Image: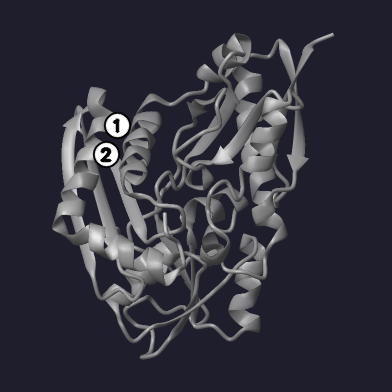
Amino acid sequence: MKHEIVVGTRKSELAMRQADGVVNLLSNMVPEYSYRIEGISTHGDNVLDVALSKIGDKGLFTKELEAALLRGEIDLAVHSMKDMPTGLPDGLVIGAVCRREFPGDVLISREGKSLEALPPGAVIGTSSLRRRAQLLHYRGDFKVANLRGNIGTRLRKLEEENLDAVILAGAGLHRMGWEHRITQVLPHSICLPAVGQGAIGVEVRAGDIKVRRLVNKIDHYESHLAVTAERSFLKRLEGGCQVPIGAFCCFDGERLQLEGVVAGLDGKQLVRSSISGDTGEAAGIGIKLAEDLLRSGAREILEKARQEHGCNE
């Protein structure tokens, strides 16, 4: 009988598909094990009537999975990297980052109009302060409506709530096979993605050498380095609640190129910059870019955003 590896994930359809993808990779690389997916409800999945920014973002979609991992109920946890706090519980590590999918945001509009073609005062749905701030910086006439729920729910609300458009992560639509719904891929010049967006991470117990060796086989070097730089950038900037921060790191030849943005909630203030560095300095690149932005006005923007959300950290 094959030894069973239990894979933990959120219960949403998208999360289950992502876990299936990880299991398929593992099954192909290490077929001598059997794999079972265990769906676990998280706090973020259960509270859908409150904006994410109002309930905090520290482990909203990860805490329950991490607790099961620490108790030994699962052997590894599959996460969207954009959901993972930059600080992990003692005893847990990111064992692998799978090959990243398209990391950016996309627009789905009810009448098939691009962002620039939407009428004055158009209502756009999103639950992300990062998207809200960058949208309002691009066009201050937009109205932004809070939008929670899974991808299917958000697409349904586009019609039911008479929104002009919604903005979603492109990777999720691709994984669900719903690319045909995309009206426009938003350029990074308008909307930088969330840290880790489009990447799937595998979290494991630090002391479980067998499982760490197993998941290392599906680690994608370039994606892992890029996400490391972005998470280092976020860690240097973040406080105790959601703030409008975006970042994207990619390879430019043999070097890493990291771009980051910090914006005020109303979009009126925005600082943005980029930096490059050697691949061996991924974490350091993130810290340096964050400090550059803090000196350029990001500190004041972040402090104001935290005050407006009643967050004193």
Tell me the quadrant of the picture where the N terminus can be found: top right
- Quarter holding the C terminus is bottom left
Q: Splitting the image into 4 quarters, where does residue 140 fall?
A: bottom left
Q: Is residue 145 visible?
A: yes
Q: How is the image coloured?
A: one colour
Residue at left offset 30%, top offset 80%: 139
Q: Residue furthest bottom?
A: 120
Q: In the rendering, which numbered label is found on residue 211?
A: none
Disc 1 residue type (three-letter): Ala
Q: Is residue 251 visible?
A: no
- Identify the residue at horizontal 75%, vertical 33% (top origin): 37
Measured Cα–Cα span from mark 1 to mark 2: 5 Å
Q: Position of residue 259 (x, y in %)?
A: 24, 48
Q: Image height check: is 61 above or below 98?
A: below
The crowd level at tag 1 (other Cα within 10 Å; few <14, some 14-19, many 20+) is: some
- Image coordinates of residue 285 in percent, x first then y, are 22, 35
Residue ID for mark 1: 283
Residue 286 marker: 2
Q: Do callouts 1 and 2 mark residues in contact (Cβ within 8 Å)? A: yes
Residue that appears at 38% across and 54% down = 193
Badge 2: residue crowd in 10 Å (few <14, some 14–19, many ≥20): many
The residue that appears at 43% across and 86% down in the rendered structure is: 122
User: Is 185 displayed left or right of 23 in the figure?
Assistant: left
Looking at the picture, which amino acid does disc 2 mark?
Gly
Q: Say above or below: 10 vs 186.
A: above
Q: Residue furthest right?
A: 1
Q: Secondary structure at mark 2?
A: helix
Residue 141, how many percent across, how many down? 34, 87
> For residue 56, which quarter of the picture?
bottom right
User: Which residue is more in the foreground, 202 or 28?
Assistant: 202
In the displayed structure, does residue 14 sit left or right of residue 174? Answer: right
Q: Residue furthest front?
A: 312
